[in-house]
């Protein structure tokens, strides 16, 4: 009598590729989450080259902002006609002239 062999289970290639892609995605996400670029690296990517780029020093400071908790004639939490009128009185009608002088 011939020996009966049981077939070995085949590993689905799509399943393995899905697991590999998931692990790569997790690795990239974790690295991107914990690594932050420095201010200098951001400047090199966002601003044009300048010979003074090496002279820039950053100092982060948090200011206490009490301005927005006060109401002034020029600022309020809701825009009103009184605020618009105060700005109209403060600013000139034509700050620069483009036509002939009158």
Image (cartoon, helix red, strand yellow):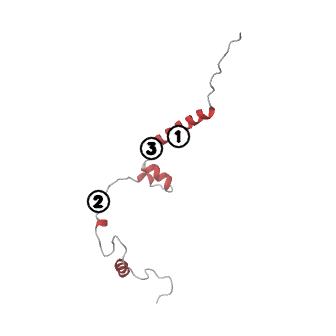
Nearest the camera: 85 or 100? 85
Q: Residue at x 45, y 80 (%)?
A: 96
Q: Estimate the spatial distance between the alpha carbons at disc 3 and disc 2, rounded to whole Å.
A: 29 Å
| Disc with the residue nearer the chain's start (3 vs 2) | 3
Whether the residues at callouts 1 and 3 have beta carbons within 8 Å, the answer is no
Q: Residue at x 31, y 66 (%)?
A: 68
Left or right? Give the position of 2 relative to 69.
right
Q: Estimate the spatial distance between the alpha carbons at disc 1 and disc 3, rounded to whole Å.
A: 12 Å
Residue tagged by mark 2? 64
Q: Is residue 14 above or below residue 94?
A: above
Estimate the x, y position of residue 72 in percent, counting from the top left: 29, 73
Estimate the x, y position of residue 77 in percent, counting from the top left: 34, 70
Residue tagged by mark 3? 33
Q: Is residue 2 above or below residue 77?
A: above
- Residue placed furthest toward the bottom: 102
Quarter of the figure with residue 66: bottom left
Q: Is residue 86 above or below residue 13?
A: below
Left or right? Give the position of 93 relative to 48.
left
Q: Residue at x 63, y 22 (%)?
A: 8
Nearest the camera: 37 or 72? 72
Label for residue 25?
1
């Amino acid at each position: 009598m011939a020996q009966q062999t049981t077939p070995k289970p085949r590993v689905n290639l799509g399943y393995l590729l899905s697991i590999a892609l998931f692990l790569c995605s997790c690795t990239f996400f974790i690295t991107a989450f914990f690594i932050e670029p420095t201010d200098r690296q951001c400047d090199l990517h966002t601003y044009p080259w300048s010979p003074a780029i090496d002279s820039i020093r950053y100092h982060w400071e948090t200011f206490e902002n009490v301005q927005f908790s006060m109401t002034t004639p020029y600022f309020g939490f809701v825009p009103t006609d009184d605020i618009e009128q105060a700005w109209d009185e403060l600013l000139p009608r034509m700050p620069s002239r483009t036509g002939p002088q009158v």
